[in-house]
Image (spheres, helix red, strand yellow):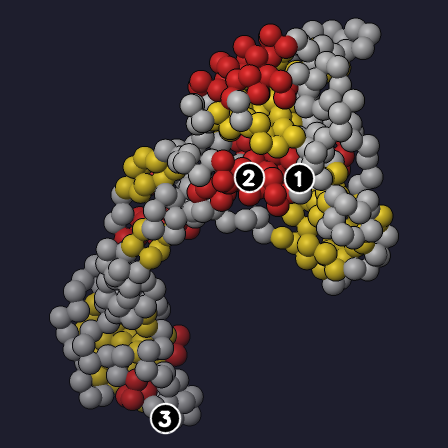
Amino acid sequence: MKLLNTDTLEEVREKLRTETEEMKFRTCVMDMEESCGFICAEDVFSPEDMPPFDRSTVDGYALAAQESYGAGESSPVFLHVCGQIGIEEAAEISPGEGEAVRVQTGSMIPEGADAAVMAEYTEEYAPGQIICCRPVSSGENVMRRGEDIRAGECIIRRGQKIGTAETGMMAGLGIRKIRVYERPSVTVISTGDELAGEGEPLTAGKIRDINTYTLSAAAEESGMTVLNKIRTADDEAEIRRAVQTASEKSDIVLISGGSSKGNRDYTKEVLEDVTGNVFTHGIALKPGKPTILAYDRARRTVIAGLPGHPMAALLVFRLVIAHWYRMKTGAKEPFLIPAVMGSNVSSNQGRETCLPVRLIRTADGYEAAPVYAKSGSISALSEADAFVMIPRDREGIRKGERIWAELL
């Protein structure tokens, strides 16, 4: 049996980036209200200042700050209320010496005023007359025009995922349209004579299909759209037909199983026939060594032959395909959680190890408890909260060592 000529994870990522340099994801202009969850395809700049005028952040009185200096409980400042500005009104009145203007939260601050004193620190002792028991400084309880966002400022960057905060900013600035990346289409192909169809009873040697649903969920979670799910037997012609059909309709094809070097593993041969461009067969990674990557230049489709074991297939998808998608769109890398390793963990030098862990909250942060499981384990998928990467030049991680964990 021919051994796999493995690449490091970084080499695989670089090969995939280089091979697909010409491939660009489609973009479209979308209504702001429908864009939540999509990735921004170009920098978005504010068309105006926010707020568009100086505004009060409290209910109270707008005044020149110096008019309140020296105010206290035992020595209040006496002020004349020269008018009132509602939140829907323009500030057409200006307080002079010894004067203040009644305002609400959101009211425009008039000329001549540079602060606002909260109503709680004032008391009306006669119609149009108040006492102020607390001094305010210039700018206190006032949001200046453009203090939040300046006209021309970049408010959403390319690669930023549109969420509730971004939607709120666009609404507040009157931005109704935004250019986003269309979600790439994915076809998931699961191969294996042993796979029972949906609703099919288990017979001797049969197991239920896990990878179709695990990989589909992972793709959707990464911002992709699953176009089709195909299940095939370990039959070269059947797999070839499935790959050809998927490659014509999808941006990404994920094939589960058949990527090793067994006598019924046909993925590599099929991908060579269909694309003529298999550039990786084997990653120096545990789990996930028998991974195949190809690029169909004619159809501009990335095809990944993933391991058949569920945990390995999921981790390779996260480390290679999801990473590549973020790189192509400029999306942020996942946030890493600092933790302390809860026990000694050994590792094989020469290949990176992807270790599933449970994160246990402690008084000082998090402790990472290894989830030991064989490559075919199913329960590890739900037991693990995150995974830790052990470098290929390390023999393991010591108990108490500080590490970074990526959430699953």
Q: Percent position (x, y) of residue 148?
A: 34, 64
Asked if the residue under mark 2 is in contact with the one under mark 1, i.e. CB atoms within 8 Å, the reply is yes
Q: Which residue is mark 2?
A: 15
Type of amino acid at the residue the image marks with label 3: Gly
Dot 1, crowdedness within 10 Å: few (<14), some or many (≥20)? some
Q: Looking at the image, which is closer to me, 123 or 13?
A: 13
Q: Which residue is mark 1?
A: 7
Q: Residue at x 68, y 23 (%)?
A: 259
Q: Quadrant of residue 201?
A: top right
Type of amino acid at the residue the image marks with label 2: Lys
Q: Looking at the image, which is closer to me, 34 or 311?
A: 311
Query: With 43 as the anchor, is 239 left or right in this view?
Result: right
SS assignment at label 3: loop
Dot 3, crowdedness within 10 Å: few (<14), some or many (≥20)? some
**Which label was assigned to residue 70?**
3
Res 108 visible: yes
Q: Percent position (x, y) of residue 375?
A: 78, 31
Query: With 267 as the anchor, is 56 left or right in this view?
Result: left
SS assignment at label 1: loop
Going from N to C along the chain, the mark reached first, 1 or 3, is 1
Against 238, residue 309 (above or below) is below
